[in-house]
Every structure is written in structure tokens, then in C-alpha cells.
Image (cartoon, coloured by chain):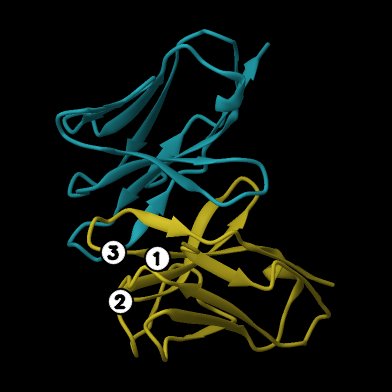
Chain colours: A cyan, B yellow
Amino acid sequence: RKEVEQDPGPFNVPEGATVAFNCTYSNSASQSFFWYRQDCRKEPKLLMSVYSSGNEDGRFTAQLNRASQYISLLIRDSKLSDSATYLCVVNRPSGTYKYIFGTGTRLKVLA
Amino acid sequence: NAGVTQTPKFRVLKTGQSMTLLCAQDMNHEYMYWYRQDPGMGLRLIHYSVGEGTTAKGEVPDGYNVSRLKKQNFLLGLESAAPSQTSVYFCASTGGTYEQYFGPGTRLTVT
């Protein structure tokens, strides 16, 4: 089993739709969780951190479920500009500042 | 504010040649990382550094060496390039918040 798993997609959704991605992680001792966005042939950029209490930033909501060991990302009112690959990132435990990246979920928002 | 910069952006090497990739950050971050990204595999950690003068191996260190002589710079060296090292290389840095900031990447082709 991979340490961090994501559905590769692609998720093809119409503009205005709501879409959700999940990411599962295997190490229950992981402490920090993030969603990054990566556009084609570009570097990953931080979208949002995922806190135990959940996190919302405009149209984006991230949730953490420690019991089931997954994090989720919800995008409401999808825009064409949301088309990208979304990477789930989990830190390795023990504060080593090392991270495990999922392979990403590709989203296409269609006009 | 430059953030994280990488040079060069593109490079083509012949098998057996050597080269050095330079990463520079202006955010006074202690932690710096070198990753490679290959299709379907996500980002994999090559080497990392937890401060000036320190380096450590990541998941895929073979064939690479690194140096962190100055806090703001992290160099990745390929001693004898192989076709398997054809990849996109990303440098990243982290401060105290665990969030990583990435450079724009170096696209390396080894023929």
C-alpha cells in the first residue's frame, strides 16, 4: 500500500459544479497535511493546509479525518481556472520536516 | 520577492556527463529539498538539508550529491548522468510552518 494514495482522475466537471477529492494516508502518526495545486509543467504551489478542525478558503474546503486516515478537498462553484492537478501532501512523523506526496488528482473544468 | 529560484531551467546531457543544479531561496528558510518528478510517480525526495552545512539522503539519493555551504543555496550534482535521471527536478524550502515553497523546476534530459 502506498503511503499516500489519490485517485488520479481525471475528474471532468462542468463550470459551477462542486467536486470533491479524497486522499488516504497510511501512517497514523502523521501530523501535517496539505493540498497543493500543480499546473501543467509548473511547480507545485500550496493551496491550503489541512487542520484538525477543517479549513475553508473561499470556494475551497479541506477536511481531515484522523480516524479513517484521509483528507478531503471540496471545490465549490468550479471555475475553468481550477483545472489543474491537486497533490495531497503528508509530513513524515517525528517532526523530520520530510514529506510524502501523492501522485495527484487531475481536475478538468469544462465550459 | 524572488522566493525560490533554480538554474538552469532546461538542460540536455549526454550519458556520463556531469552537471550541477543550483537552488537559491531568499526567505531565510532552514530546510531545503531536492525532488524529482516523473510521470505517474509523484514527487520523490532525493536529498534534503536541515541547515547550513548539513545534508541528508532522501528516498532516491543514488547518483546524486548535494552541498549546502550557504544557508540560501542548495546544490544538486549529477556525477555521471544516466538516462534514468531524465526528469523534472524541483527544489523547495520550508520555514517553521511546514509549508513548502517550490522553485520553477529544471527539465533535464539525458541522452
- Dot in front, 2 or 3: 3
**Does residue A32 appear to the left or right of B80 in the view shown?**
left
> What's under tag 3, amino acid-wise?
Gly
Disc on res. B46: none
Which numbered disc flags the more N-terminal residue, 1 or 2?
2
Label 1 secondary element: strand
Task: Point out residue B13 in the picture as x, y percentages from the top left corner.
Answer: 80, 78
Disc on res. B93: 1
Which numbered disc flags the more N-terminal residue, 2 or 3?
2
Q: Which of A53 and B96 is in front in this view?
A: B96
Would you identify the image quadrant in which residue B37 lies?
Answer: bottom right
Label 3 secondary element: loop
Residue labelled with disc 2: B50
> What's under tag 2, amino acid-wise?
Val
How crowded is the residue under tag 2: few (<14 C-alpha within 10 Å), some, or many (20+)?
Answer: some
Q: From what the image shows, is residue B20 above or below residue A13?
A: below
Disc 1 to disc 3, C-alpha distance: 7 Å
How crowded is the residue under tag 1: few (<14 C-alpha within 10 Å), some, or many (20+)?
Answer: many
**Does residue A73 appear to the left or right of B67 in the view shown?**
left
Q: Do the residues labelled 1 and 2 touch (CB within 8 Å)?
A: no
Give the tally of numbered discs: 3
- Dot in front, 1 or 2: 1
Q: Which chain carries label 2?
A: B
Residue, x 38% and y 33% (percent of image)?
Answer: A23
Task: Point out residue A47 in the picture as x, y percentages from the top left corner.
Answer: 41, 38
Q: Do the residues labelled 1 and 3 touch (CB within 8 Å)?
A: yes
Task: Point out residue A92 in the picture as x, y percentages from the top left corner.
Answer: 28, 57
Q: Which chain carries label 3?
A: B
Label 2 secondary element: loop
How crowded is the residue under tag 3: few (<14 C-alpha within 10 Å), some, or many (20+)?
Answer: some
Q: Are marks 2 and 3 in contact (CB under 8 Å)?
A: no
Disc on res. B95: 3
